[in-house]
Image (cartoon, rainbow, N blue to C red):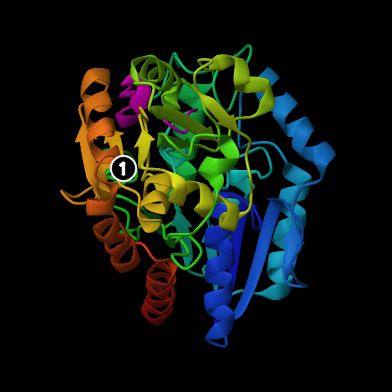
Amino acid sequence: MKVLQINIFNTNGSTGRIVRGICDALQTCGHEAYTAYAKGEPTNENNYKIQTEFGYNFSIIQTRILGKHGFFDVSHTKKLINWIRHIAPDIIHLHNIHGHYINIEILLQFLKEYRRPVIWSLYDCWAFTGHCAHFDYIGCEKWKTLCHDCPQLAYYPITWFFDKTASIYKRKKEIITGAQNIRFVVPSKWMLGCVGQSYLQGMEVHMIPNGIDTKLFAPTESDIKGQLGIEDKKMLLGVAFAFNERKGVDYFNKLAELLPEDHKLVLLGVEERHKHFFNYKIMILHRTNSEIEMAKVYSSADVYINPTLEETQGMTNIEALSCGVPVVTFDSGGSPECITKMTGKVVDRGNIEGFYRAALDLADKKTEYSRHCREYAVSNCDKKRQNERYLRLYKEVLLKR
C-alpha cells in the first residue's frame, strides 16, 4: 500500500504523534508512507510541507476579517494536489485539516474526482459545524440542524466581524456528504453519538480510540517532587496543551483554595503569558514536548485531575493511567470512557466539592490503584493496537474498492 496522511502537525502534539506512529507501522510492514503537513520539520523525503509561515499567518488574518475558515489557502492547496497526483497514493488519510492551512472545498472536490479511498479521523467536531471545533462547553445544539448566530465567534477559529456560520454549515454539508469515498474514524463513544446526530449520519463511521506509546508513558523513577520542594506532600497533577475555561481553569483555582497544606496542585503545560490566570497556590510547570519528561512528571503525581468541561476522548487521562496514576474527571464528553472502578472516579460536571473529595481519596490510594491503571492502559490504549486497527481498515477499504 501507498498511504498519504494529511495533518496540521508532522510530529508534534497528539495528532502529530498519531501520524508518526501510523507511518512507522506502515513502513515496518513494508508499505510506503507519505505525510503532508503545515507545521513542523520534515523527517524524510516522503514529507511535503503545505504551508509557509507567511501563508499560515495570512490565512489567520483572512479568517478573522472574513469569517470563512477553511475556505482560503487556494494556491497552497492546488500545489498539494499536484504533489498528490505525482505520488499517486492508494489511500489518503485526513487528520486535522482545519487550522489555517488548507482549502477544504478544493481538496474534497479533488478527492471525489480522485476516486481512491479516503479515511478522515475526527479529533473534534469541526467537520460538522459552521464554525467551532467544540460545542459541549456551552451546550449549543444548532449543529444538529443549521448553525447560525454563533455564540463562539470569539473562540477558535476567531472571527472579528462577520457571522458566516449558516453559509459555511451548508457548504461543508454539501461538499463533505457529497464525497461518497470518505470513511470517518472517531476516538470515543461520545464522538460516535455526535456524528450520528449530525449531517454525517448515514456515512460510514468506525471507532478507533487514540493510542499512546505505553513504553514511553510508563511508571518512571524521578526526583520531580524533590526538585519542586514538595517531597513531603501529595501531588495533584493537571496537564493540558492549552489551559482555558473549557479545560477547567476556574476549577483548578477553586481546588487550590480547598486543598490542605499537605497537598500541592501542579499544572504542566502553562504558557508564561497565561500564568496570571492561576491561583498563587498552584505550582506552574512550562510545556515540554519530551514524552520522557512528561512520563516523569505523571509518575510523580499521586492523582491526576482533569476538570475538563469538554473533551473528545481525554488523551492526558490515558497518559496518566499508563504511568500508574489514578484519574478523577468530570462527566464531560469522552473523558470518562477510560475510567473504571479501579482506575479513577467520575464526578458530575461542575461539582467541585465532589471533585475535591474524589481527588483526596485517590491521592491516598495511588498504590492500591496503580497496577490496575497501568494494566488498563497497556491492554486498551497502546498505540500499537491503534495502528494495527488502522492498517486493517486500510486493507478493508482497498478490498471493497
Residue sitting farthest toward the front = 232
Residue sitting farthest toward the right = 54
Say which residue appears at 63% left-offset and 11% top-offset. 161
132 in magenta: yes
Q: In this view, does 343 lie above or below 336?
A: below
Q: In which image quadrant can residue 354 be found?
A: top left
Is 347 on the left or on the right of 42, as rendered? left
Q: In which image quadrant can residue 6 be found?
A: bottom right
Q: In this view, does 82 lie above or below 76?
A: below
Is 122 on the left or on the right of 24, as rendered? left
- Residue 307 location (% of width, % of height): 35, 29
Q: Can residue 73 be seen in this view?
A: yes
140 in magenta: yes
Say which residue appears at 31% left-offset and 28% top-offset. 145
Q: Which of 224 and 272 is in front in this view?
A: 224
Amino acid carrying mark 1 in the image: Val
- Residue 294 location (% of width, % of height): 54, 50
Is 220 on the left or on the right of 385, as rendered? right
Q: Main secondary structure of the magenta part?
A: loop
The magenta region covers 131-146
Q: Which of 162 and 361 is in front in this view?
A: 361
Q: Is residue 194 visible?
A: no
Residue sitting farthest toward the bottom = 30
How crowded pointer 1 is (Cα within 10 Å; few <14, some 14-19, many 20+) is rated as many
Q: In which image quadrant can residue 103 be found?
A: top right
- Residue 318 location (% of width, % of height): 37, 52
* Residue at numbered disc 1: 327
Say which residue appears at 37% left-offset and 71% top-offset. 385
Where the N terminus falls, by quadrant? bottom right
Q: Nearer the viewer, residue 336 or 35?
A: 336
Where the C terminus falls, by quadrant? bottom left
Q: Is mark 1 on a helix, strand or loop?
A: strand
